[in-house]
Amino acid sequence: MISDKIVISGIGCALADFLYSGVSFSSTDFVKYQSRQPGDGGLSPGKLVFTEELEQYTSVPYQQIYQDLTKGKKPDSVNIGGPGLVSLINTAQLLDPGNFKVRYFGGAGNDDTADFIFDLLKKTPLDISNYERIGERFTPFTHVLSDPSYDNNHGERTFINNIGAAWDFTPDLLNDDFFDSDIVCLGGTALVPRIHDCLTELLARAKSNNCLTVVNTVFDFRNEKRNPGKPWPLGNTTESLKLIDLLIMDCEESLRISGSATIEDAAAYFAGEDIASFIITNGIRDLFAWSNGKVFTKTGLIQLPVSQNILETIKQNPELKGDTTGCGDNFAGGAIASLARQLRSHQKGGYDFMEALAWAIASGGFACFYLGGTYVEKHAGEKLARISDLVKKYNRQISQ
């Protein structure tokens, strides 16, 4: 579908993030619940674990674990989270609603957490007319433990997730309207199990409707637990990769999906598959990106740094430092927004990959200026103006 208004539709992980900053990953309380081997159900910096798996691993009720880790204090921030929802919020904030329509499809529970999410979403330009309360389970949530001193003060987070109502969202709840789109996005579907298991079929349906497809991943604890040390499946991975126009992963996810030992090996693996383009982020280290020319202009393997302007701004103004929660989700949203803008401008492929990467990097970096993944604008267009400035500064950085 290509019309006067570009339509972007997405599905995937949506939840409430309860953020606790200043949790030391070297503390006694954290270490006693820490993972000893991959997929065992314990806590691990930078990774996600499910509440029920953590309970099984520790033989301790989650409420007691939660109390030990947070010391009973209230969260520093409560925000909307999830690679599906947060990426699309950022996409919507970066696009003119007169020319673009950004829609999220999904299911929440029927509880106070859902009330919070819906109230906050009303302050964003995202179309949530297809985001509904389903079932009797809790709305998905994540307790995000953030240690700013980890990795030589670069910071890291640990995620404890309850899938809740996401168990009840199935492909048959997606109506035909979802696929009547120009771009279809699947974000963090590993936390929406029944969608994730049908990823190949959903991608095939999107492509049969001439949609561009974007997939951004999340730590797949379910498959890590099921087959420790084995590659995580993206449906039928080989077939799915053929149907993906842009795949966005962080380093850990790229290693686990590809079965590789290093980020270089993972990049080589994906470049050897029949995928249109991919990006592998790596925290404050260089990202890797590649395109075969089908959607974006053809490139070799690209390595790009993060924004030095953002790093220097935080260093010189420590009061601006929020946390890294949502950086990857907003990164994906920046790339999607750039793809949509370029699709509207000439609609023939051969899009500028460097432009999409610059918008992604600026969007991901901007998320470091506040707590949580979702930024609530003071007025429409505020975030676009701020990220546009960061994009200009980043382009100057990499052109030197």
Image (tube, grey):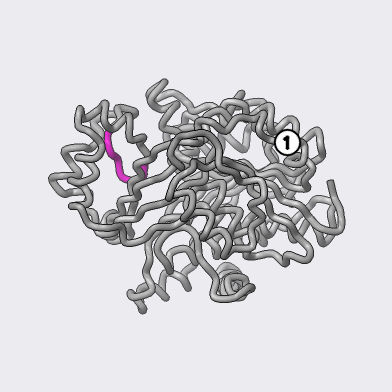
User: Residue 117 in magenta?
Assistant: no
Residue occupying image coordinates x 66% and y 33%? 173
Q: Which residue is mark 1?
A: 175
- Residue 46 within the magenta-colored segment of the rendering: yes
Residue 219, percent across and down?
Answer: 44, 38
Indicate the quadrant where residue 187 lies. top right
- The amino acid marked with disc number 1 is Asn
Highlighted magenta segment, given as a residue range: 42-47
Quadrant of res 148: bottom left
Chief secondary structure of the magenta span? loop
Residue drawn 42% across and 69% down? 311
Q: Residue furthest top?
A: 227
Label 1: state its secondary structure: loop
- Pick the front one: 219 or 113: 113
Q: Residues within 10 Å of mark 1 (few under 14, many from 20)?
A: few
Q: Is residue 246 visible?
A: no
As drawn, is 61 to the left or to the right of 156? left
Q: Is residue 358 above or below residue 179?
A: below
Q: Give the tally of numbered discs.
A: 1
At horizontal 47% and vertical 39% (from top left) the residue drawn is: 253
Q: Answer above or below: position of 395 versus 151.
A: below
Percent x, y of residue 167:
50, 31
Q: Is residue 2 visible?
A: yes
- Which residue lies at the image location 46% right of the left edge and 55% below the top edge? 116
Above-or-below relation of 240 to 6: above
Specify the quadrant that holds the C terminus.
bottom right
Q: Which of these two is toward me, 106 or 43?
A: 106
